Image: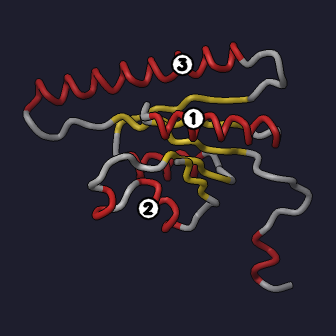
Amino acid sequence: MDEGARMFELGTDGPSVIVAGLDGSPSSMRAAAYAAGLARRQGSMLALVYIQPMGTMGGADVGVAINQAGHEVAADLERQIREGVDQGSHGPSIRWEFHTAPGDAYAGIVEHADRLKADAVVIGASEKAGHRILGSVAVRLVKAGRWPVTVVP
């Protein structure tokens, strides 16, 4: 048996865990909706991950304000997800979890995908012009080559 043949688990159809990165932007919400559809059709667990930006500049007061805003965004995203799941209750249910932590978006999504043993990652395309030069989280995830990554526009 060659090395490539041993990398795939036999007896599985599709992903068992899909990680979707969220930040509240329209493209990330479309990515979450797309990932939810995949999870529903595949019978997968959907792990929605929001990495809260950390305040590193501007002193303690600014850092506290940024951290508080991150917690508020996380709570709002989880509320929106719960409402969306409740409204979609007429069809098959989706198994889902919401994860949040402070840190760098790329590193946080990688950490969660590894810890949850993700089979796929779904993320929205960056809407920031500067990412054409520095590289977006989506591009960095694709380049990491550790999971199939779907980038939703």
Which amino acid type corresponds to the residue marked 1 in the rendered image?
Leu
**Precedes in sequence: disc 2 or disc 1:** 1
Local SS, label 1: strand
Q: In which quarter of the view is residue 88 placed?
A: top right
Camera-nearest residue between 29 and 18: 29
Which amino acid type corresponds to the residue marked 2 in the rendered image?
Arg
Which amino acid type corresponds to the residue marked 3 in the rendered image?
Gln
Q: In this figure, which residue is indicated by the disc labeled 2?
A: 140
Residue at horizontal 55%, vertical 53%? 151
Q: In this figure, which residue is indicated by the disc labeled 3?
A: 80
Q: In which quarter of the view is residue 74 placed?
A: top left
How crowded pointer 1 is (Cα within 10 Å; few <14, some 14-19, many 20+) is rated as: many
Q: CA distance from mark 3 to mark 1?
A: 12 Å
How crowded pointer 2 is (Cα within 10 Å; few <14, some 14-19, many 20+) is rated as: few
Instruction: Specify the quadrant that holds the N terminus.
Output: bottom right
Q: In this figure, which residue is indicated by the disc labeled 1?
A: 48
Residue at horizontal 58%, vertical 22%? 81
Local SS, label 2: helix
Residue at horizontal 38%, vertical 56%? 136
**Precedes in sequence: disc 3 or disc 1:** 1
